[in-house]
Amino acid sequence: MIKSLHKRQSELANAKRQLDILSNGIFQAGELPTFKAKISESNQFPLKAKKLEILQINLGYMCNQTCKHCHVDAGPDRKEIMGKETMLQCLEVIKNTGAHTLDLTGGAPEMNPNFRWFVDEASKAGIKDFIVRSNLTIITANKKYHDLPEFFKAHNIHVVSSMPHWTKGKTDNQRGDGVFDASLKALKMLNAIGYGMPDSKLKLDLVYNPSGAFLPANQSAMEKDFKKALLEEFDIHFHNLFALTNLPVSRFLDYLIASENYEDYMYNLVEAFNPNAVGNVMCTNTLSVSWNGYLYDCDFNQMLELPVNSKAKHISEYNERLLEGRDIVISQHCYGCTAGAGSSCQGTVA
Amino acid sequence: MQKTYYDPADLKKFGKISEWNEELGAKFFEYYGKVFEEGALTEREKSLIALAVSHTIQCPYCIDAYTGDGLQRGITKAEMMEALHVAAAIRGGASLVHGVQMMNKVNKLDM
């Protein structure tokens, strides 16, 4: 298993260094327009936050996998985990928010020792859509996690899981050896109790990230291919496929540079810029909370350490009135969310 | 004079073909777009056909474009290579099948 950039003490573990790369080079030289210049062409700058709909909470960067494309730089060697005090502050917000979706992510959020307590408490708020982003393999990784499907079911959790391909080679290449087989096993466990089955209310969606320096194809066409292959070859069911673009952040940025694909990839993102996707990008209706309680416009800004442009910077200072209408903090990575049909944690946006 | 006949950057300029004949250029690109829409064949199947044909006509622009397109669509290396062997088999077969003409001629002229 590869080590995180942080463990390797890579210069790209430093958010400032990543932002330097994204701001200089082809963008500084004027070869490509900055994201600010690009959205200004269609009078969409500054991008403004609308009413909060999705509260996304990152429970920590610890993970049992070290996927090559991970924008979190998550892995077993990351120790940043949300503590109970911050969780209590989050719960106060969850009880009072008007957001219709609560979205728990990581790392592997299930590895947080207070995960089950937090889900128990948060589910009492009665939020319409309660998502846990599970990497699947955590369910089979250790005996103590084997009952997670039942736990999810008991709390009516909407499970969203990554699956880069329906073949072992492409999946393991991106996510690590053995991930494909373990993911299939976990999917079967989820299916067995009703998750992802046709007409079942237990929602199981998959997330597709390209396994290389290319953009995702049409989401509905990919969904058809995934459904056909997973059903015919493995008798596995799921509901929706979200096709996400990899953003040039953290380990994916590292991969792009190491494989000499960075400039071509940025050209592709800029070329695929879709002004119609800008208005619906996830940062306009989402708030991302980091493991230590700080607020960001999205999970990518969290990793780039670009905090919200608001007086309320921490979950303890949460104030929907202050946060609504704030200017979204942008940089060139934002091109990833506006390419083609757009990209968000809920899939395409345009 | 440019140093090479093919420049990868030229692929992105394909649309400029219309600048010298807007009517025909527009008609071509409209046709091209329509051809690759899902019909009796899926977009994925059409992408594989395009990849195989790209190799048959040995167009580096097309090979670049449809290799990338295939990756985007989740087409695997194995599928890509099988498609190429279909192209190679047809191309090789096309040469070899003319052997019948050669044999006919030989049989006619030879004692």
Image: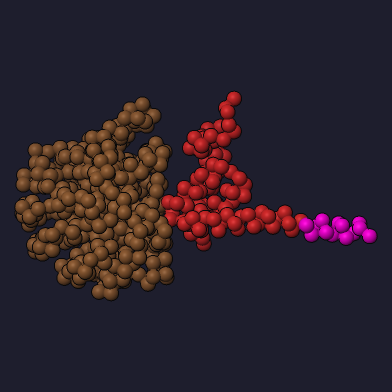
What is the tally of numbered marks visible in this picture? 0
For the point 22% across and 51% down, the residue is A77
The residue closer to the viewer here, B14 or A211, is A211
Colour of chain B in the rendered structure image: red
Q: What predominant SS class does the magenta segment belong to? A: helix
Colour of chain A in the rendered structure image: brown
Q: Which residue lies most toward the bottom here?
A: A192
Image quarter (top left, top right, bottom left or bottom right) of the N terminus of chain A: bottom left
B87 left or right of A9 in image = right
For the point 23% across and 38% down, the residue is A15
Residue B73 seen in render: yes
Magenta residues, as a range? Answer: B99-111
Residue B14, position in %: x, y? Answer: 52, 38
Residue A254, position in %: x, y? Answer: 33, 42
For the point 19% across and 40% down, the residue is A305
Residue B21, position in %: x, y? Answer: 56, 34
The residue closer to the viewer here, B21 or B32, is B32
